[in-house]
Amino acid sequence: MIALRRNHFLALAALYALAMVYMSLVLGPLGFHYVPMGFADAWDKFLSVRFVSHGSNERPDWIANMMMPVPLTFLINSTFAMGIITGRRATGIVVTLAVGFLFVLVLKYAQLFFPPRTVTLNYITAQLIGVVLGVVAFQFSHTRLYPRLLSLFEDGEGLTLVLGAYSAFLIAYYLMPFDITLSLGDLAARALELFGILFSVPGEGHNATYQLLLVIADTLTAIPRGMYLAVRGRQRTTRRLIWRSIGVVFLVFVAQLFILGTEPFLVSLIYRSAGAIMGVLFIQRIKGKDLRKRHYYFSRFVPATIPIYLLLVMFVSGVFSSQWWTLDEATNALEPRQLLPFWNFYIVSKAHAAQSLVVTSILYAPIGVMVWLRRGFWSSGTTFSAFLAFSLSMLVEVLRMMKPGLRPDFSDPVIAAIAAGIAFKALPFLWRMFEREAAQSGTLDSYVASMGQQPARQPASA
């Protein structure tokens, strides 16, 4: 496993702090909007900040503010103490809380110079809670979780860790924005809302082809979850694993019913269960197989897949239409604030921003997969994959800028490049893990079969 030193954690904490400053001060409804104010006046205004009554529609933003400082304080705590020596651990907690609280208060004070940013005790409290949660997450991970994960990794269970982390992320993605119904009023509003959601399908309002692609994408994302259940239950029968997969899908669906802002489609029970079942059957299928040969087999189909992939990207991006703007019309319609990195993520809900990030990553990660399939194991190609993804995404956004009714997002090329680069870098390790799983499962099945074929023990003769 990769070992990070204190200076690495310090650098990551500094980068994340800069990102928080950018999101809190630069991004805004008006873009970068600095209004000079006397420091004394700003301080008096800061001291007069009060709690504001918020409705259920404000809870997702409050939760997002609470989650924002968690990674920062986790990284700061990693810098000051590794949680091994009790005295150092206590010192690390105190220093981390002090730095985290001070950073949040300074940032909220600075927001007063950038109207119309919202500065209330509600959001200050949310971020201070996030500081504490980051410290709790660090202490739990380094005293309980990390030793357990390290033990699993050393025992050859790397695939279990990867698929488990993916499954946890996927469930969290389904449950965003974590806005649980907390009152009878919320339950009543949610019940009325569900009547219009349960019997609809993803992509309502788009054409049937687009809706079908969304269903296929959602089905494919459920496959690794079925794989996780299969590798965790190697000794269970395929039938039991399938029923477990269906049960997990159903439980997540039930949880979604009580989360405001989620869309629990009834039809999703079918296609997500199908995806999880495919994951189970895939793990069962590769038992005892030589996956190295499969790698070369799949690489032969990459040239034929490229034009299909490009057409799919263009279709999903919405550029297949007959209406076009001239260059002058497109540049006149483009607002300067749209050129700010991640501005489009700010003007939408936090759940929608997360969905956009995931969709963009999924859309361009296949570039890294295809490059790796053609180049093979342990070859260089991370930069090349990122360059191809960046170029294709930039072309798509320029085309979207020329289309009436579409909003380009020039942050997507950066996300696309990172997704493709990570995909290329991670695939050799993932493939090795699947090879180990195939060999391990095949050996286990052979052992169980041999045990079942042993002759019964004869009683000793008198």
Image (cartoon, helix red, strand yellow):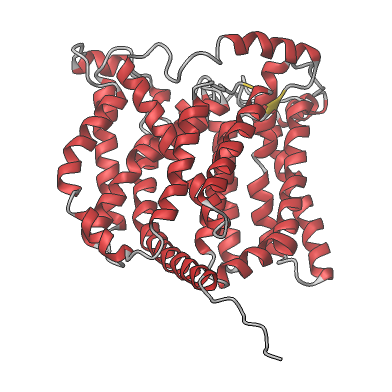
* Total tally of numbered discs in the picture: 0
Position of the C terminus, as image quadrant, is bottom right
Q: Confirm whether residue 152 shows in the render.
A: yes
Q: Confirm whether residue 172 shows in the render.
A: no
Q: Nearer the viewer, residue 181 or 60?
A: 181
| Residue with the most extreme bottom position | 462
Image point 18% across, 49% down: which residue?
A: 301
Q: Is residue 226 left or right of residue 312?
A: right
| Residue with the most extreme front position | 462
Image point 27% across, 59% down: which residue?
A: 294
Image point 40% across, 24% down: which residue?
A: 338
**Residue 282 % position (x, y):** 41, 50
431 relative to 337, above or below: below
Q: Nearer the viewer, residue 381 or 313?
A: 313
Q: Nearer the viewer, residue 38 or 370?
A: 370
315 relative to 21, above or below: above
**Residue 218 % position (x, y):** 44, 32
**Residue 199 % position (x, y):** 52, 13
Query: Which of the 4 quarters of the picture holds residue 89?
Result: bottom right
**Residue 129 % position (x, y):** 77, 39
Query: Which of the 4 quarters of the picture holds residue 54?
Result: top right
Image point 26% across, 50% down: which residue?
A: 370
